[in-house]
Image (cartoon, helix red, strand yellow):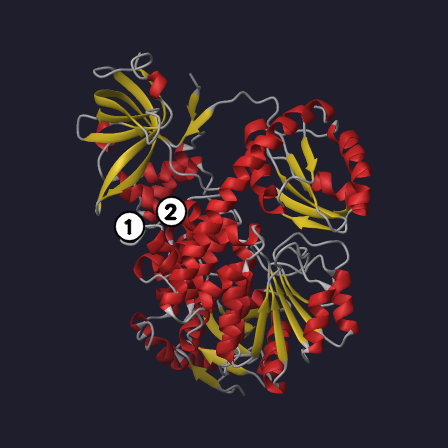
Amino acid sequence: MKRWRAKALDEGRVRELTARYSCSALEAAILVRRKVVDADALLFHFERDLRYLPGPFRFHAMSAAVDRLRLAHERKEKVLIFGDRDADGISATTLLFEALCAFGLTVCWRVPVADEPYGLSCNAVDEHAAAGGTLIVTVDCGISNRAEIAYARHRGIDVLVIDHHAAPETLPDAIIINAKVPGAGYPHEFLSGCATAWKVVTALRFSTSGWYQRPVVLLHVRPVTGAYTIEAVKMCNMEVVDRLSETVVPRMLLPSHTRLGAFLEGQEVFVWDEQVVRTQLAKVFGGEFPWRFTDVRPRMAAFFPQCERASLLRMKDFSRIGRARSKPMEEIESFINLFITFVQKDTQLYRGAADELQLVAISTLSDLMVLAGENRIMVRYGLQAMNEAPRVGLRELFAIQRLMGKKLGTVEVGWSIVPLINATGRLGCPHRAVELFLMREASQRALQARKMVQLNEQRKKLGRSARALVEPLARASLETYSNRLAVVCSDKIHRGVTGILANCLSEALRVPCVIICIMADGHAVGSLRSARGYHLFSLLDPLADLFSDYGGHAFAAGFSIPSERIPQLLHRMELYAATIEFADESAQECGEFDAELDATQMTRGLLTLVDRFEPYGEGNPPLCFLAKRLKIFSASLFGRTERVHVKLTLDAQVHKWPAIYWGAGEKLAQEFAVGDVVDAVFQVTRNTFQGTCTPQLVIQDLWRSE
């Protein structure tokens, strides 16, 4: 029997969260156990609104990117969007193409097909140059294409790189929007390629408003003991660019003798309640000051009626951002947040979000981005939009997968939709998925969706036959690579399934896995997947001199290499494998659950709690509970081909729960039986059958109670 334990718990933090957020003690305990305790993490757990997302201009290069796209529109330039072949790249290509077309740009798109390499190619540059193109926008690729971008510049083509992969030491000569680039300015590194593209799209939309590149100053005056503190914050594009605070004793200084004079000179100054501010400044400076103000409160009240008569002191008490902070929010901070939200509303910054965040959600889930921070809000919003009004292309995929009318969550999207999109890229035709999302005729989309299902079936067949070939080779390679790495290199592997194989085998063997496909053109491509927390770039970086190109993420990466270098690569991997260390090597295998439930908590209300922690995925696994002394009311075997699974009804006193225990057929009657009283570790899910949705438990482990 697997050993289980509750995650560590700080009771003091539980009480603090319960009081501050008015949440249940159970929810607070789970948050503490999952280490969701700092201000930002709590904000993104409790809040759903897009206004809490960091603004796109947190990227220091965003204005340059926007200005280059606006120049392309002004000059009527031809623009090429160059994407990637996976679900992230396909989603990003679709989103960016639709947005740039709507903006009025002349745009075409391209993704690598057949055996074309990952990333921008010189061939694509030549074709775009021949068509008279002068701007290329790479999306979900480009950061490692320094040579190809240099070639594009040589051909007179500018390049805008929108990417999210790890940045090399030497960056390409391009405008770069990538949160992983040192000094990029963006607070969250783990955006998908499509999410990064969406940031560019929102910034471009913002640039059509009167607020773009419009510097303003927010001014606030507050009394302190025997003096007044005057705070001024300079903002542009919804970002703070400068600020000062000056405390002045009344009638001791002229305005020109303070730092305020130079700071406010020539600026558009916004205040909250002009009459109050003027009265306070008159007390400070004796009635004379040279500044003109715009009272922003009446304009904000059009969007937020509670602003109409409230002071900033009162408004900061309403602040949901302030609630997440350990220290009270200052009035000027409340003013900044209100102003940013006002500008977002005034510019309709997120007006395309219902369609666009569906693509962002797919990309985030497919690329295994951490579901923390703003990714939670974007994915949650995208999933809600899919449930309410699925966008063009997704509607057809939902229909063919029989998902219409069901509540869609990360599991349904990740298991039923993402593989269909990825299959097109793995079999060399990612353009089919992009076309599906862009087709106008519903009949054409339905036909394209059927083709994608067929491709996925073909991909599964290839994967099964390839695994039969590769798994014995991978196991045999362990001895060569110090039992710390599995490596398989073959010309009999289809390049489209190398990533899937590496993923499956890394899970099965519990070591990082490298699958290399040797192609007929003299090159080879490799896919790597990690295990036990190992950072793949610790392996790839020392081998960089051998690769034509490499990149990816800490736990999923890839490379291309001339075939003649493979013997050298394998030899150096063999030497390096002996040095690989795993963070969890000495740890005993022990499962952890989020909370132990008593009988009074085993109600349908658990679904509400489970929903509050959605979306689930990377970095946020489904909630896992322990309940003791449940009586097995009924038990039966089931399965499509073999009856290897168990269907149970568990009596929790307050409620009888249907439950599924996958692969536990052999345990029935041996380890548990009808009438037994058992302890169970489980997840809570929904089961939809013939249009009826019922809660059920998915058993992770079960044993007779002591």
Tell me, yes or no, if residue 410 can be seen here.
yes
- Residue at 81% x, 47% y is 545
Q: Is residue 483 visible?
A: no
Relative image position of residue 42 (x, y in whole percent): 43, 48
363 vs 238, nearest the viewer? 363
Q: Give the residue drawn at x 67%, y 27%.
A: 484
- Image position, residue 136 (x, y; %): 65, 71
Which residue occupies the foreground of this view, 387 or 110? Answer: 110
Dot 1 crowding, Cα within 10 Å, few <14, some 14–19, many 20+: some
Query: Is the residue marked by circle 2 packed among few (<14), some (14-19), or many (20+) residues within 10 Å?
Result: some
Q: Earlier in the sequence, mark 2 or mark 1?
A: 1
Residue bearing mark 1: 406
Image location (x, y in percent) of residue 387: 32, 56
Question: Vertically, is 196 above or below 649?
Answer: below
**Which residue: 59% across, 33% down?**
531
Outermost residue toward the left in this view: 654
Whole-angstrom CA distance, mark 2 to mark 1, is: 9 Å
Q: How many marks?
A: 2
Q: Could you say which disc has been placed on residue 53 in the image?
A: none
**SS at badge 2:** helix
Q: Are marks 2 and 1 in contact (CB under 8 Å)?
A: yes
Q: Which residue is mark 2?
A: 412
Q: Residue 620: image x %, image y %?
A: 45, 42
